[in-house]
Amino acid sequence: MCDVRNGVFEVDGAALRAAPLPVVPAAGAEDRGTYHARPSIEIARRIGAPWAEFPGVHMEFLRNPGGPSIP
């Protein structure tokens, strides 16, 4: 669903739009406006898909390696 030629990453929008399941690009809320979130926002715009925002940051597991505490 992507193509890399001459060092340029290009998303195959047609393939993503034709995917058998919904494609919902997303990023962490604390990443809004950063380079971590911009690709997912642009991909969502290009394929006409919703964009989702999750709590936390890109690679949250590095900030909290133990994960959420589960009672």
Image: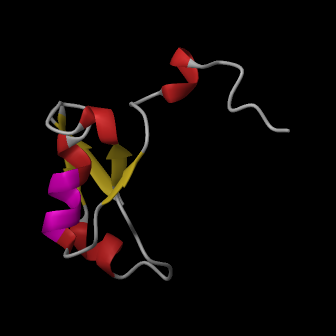
Quadrant location of the C terminus in the rendered image:
top right
Image quadrant occupied by the N terminus: bottom left
Could you say which quadrant of the image residue 31 lies in?
Answer: top left
Asked if residue 42 is among those painted magenta in the image, a careful observer would answer yes
Does 51 appear above or below 7?
Answer: below
Asked if residue 25 is positioned above or below residue 35 in the image, the reply reads below
Q: How many marks?
A: 0
Residue 33 figure quarter? top left
Residue 8: where, in percent of width, then height? 15, 38
Residue 65 position, x and y percent, is 65, 18
3 or 24, which is in the foreground?
A: 24
Left or right side of 70 for 19: left
Q: Is residue 5 above or below residue 59?
A: below
Q: Is residue 28 magenta?
A: no
Residue 61 x, y percent position in the rendering: 57, 25
Residue in the image at 80% along x and 38% along y: 70
Residue range corresponding to the magenta coloring: 41-46
Report the magenta stretch's main SS. helix
Residue furthest to the front in view is 71
- In the image, what residue occupies the spot 33% across and 71% down? 16
